[in-house]
Image (tube, helix red, strand yellow):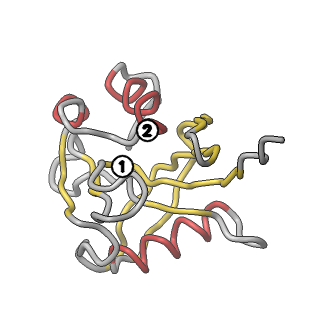
Amino acid sequence: MVPARRTVRVVAALIPRPEDGRQFLVQQRLPGGSRALLWEFPGGKVEAGETDAAALARECREELDVELAVGRRLWEGQHSYPDLTVELVLFLARIVSGEPRPLGAHALAFHTPAQMQSLPFCEADIPLLDDLVAGRLGALD
């Protein structure tokens, strides 16, 4: 019998660069773990009893050393990896205090959606990135 695949809910932030709003913060995963050195939008797993917004604020505080104002939900999708299924939800967010630092990431960068397409992204993020590039997420301000 094949074991059931674990499902995790993951929240991510679309954080525009304050100076221009056309570039967004992305992070490169740490080496040595699952999906090592792939790029993704900042965020993480929702823990039991947490709301999506609270989980996103906590993850960005822990991994980026910033406080976020979490805005509206922009996108939702699901992706199955061999080891787990990810329910991914993207929220518009802005940094209200702190400067992003890679506490839980290998690297951080601000890129336009077109520039992001040249980076190796996690598979779960690719449909989201495609919709961002195509302008299907609505107003981003």
Task: Tell which circle, 1 or 2, labels the residue nearer the N-terminal end.
Answer: 1
Spatial CA distance of label 1 from label 2 is: 6 Å
Residue, x 36% and y 49% (percent of image)?
40
> Is residue 139 shown left or right of residue 97?
right
Q: Quadrant of the C terminus?
A: top left
Task: From the top left corner, tell me how far across and down residue 95 is, in percent.
Answer: 35, 67
Say what secondary structure mark 1 lies in. Answer: strand
Task: From the top left corner, tell me how far across and down residue 129 is, in percent.
Answer: 37, 32
Decide: few, some or many residues near mark 2? Use Cα within 10 Å; few <14, some 14-19, many ≥20. some
Residue 22 appears in which quarter of the rendering?
A: top left
**Which of these two is toward me, 37 or 3?**
3
Q: Quadrant of the N terminus?
A: top right
Tag 2: amino acid? Asp
Residue 63 appears in which quarter of the rendering?
A: bottom left
Residue, x 43% and y 80% (percent of image)?
62
Residue, x 48% and y 38% (percent of image)?
124
> Looking at the picture, does residue 19 appear above or below residue 121?
below
Q: Return the residue found at the far right.
A: 1
> Looking at the picture, does residue 84 appear above or below residue 140?
below
> Is residue 120 shown left or right of residue 2?
left
Tag 1: amino acid? Glu
Decide: few, some or many residues near mark 1? Use Cα within 10 Å; few <14, some 14-19, many ≥20. many
Q: Are discs 1 and 2 less than 8 Å apart at CB?
A: yes
Residue, x 43% and y 57% (percent of image)?
34
Q: Which disc number belongs to residue 125?
A: 2
Q: Return the residue found at the far front.
A: 1
Disc 1 marks which residue? 40
Task: From the top left corner, tell me how far across and down residue 93 is, in percent.
Answer: 43, 57
Query: How many marks do you count on the picture?
Result: 2
Say what secondary structure mark 2 lies in. Answer: helix
Task: From the top left corner, tell me how far across and down residue 101 is, in percent.
Answer: 23, 75
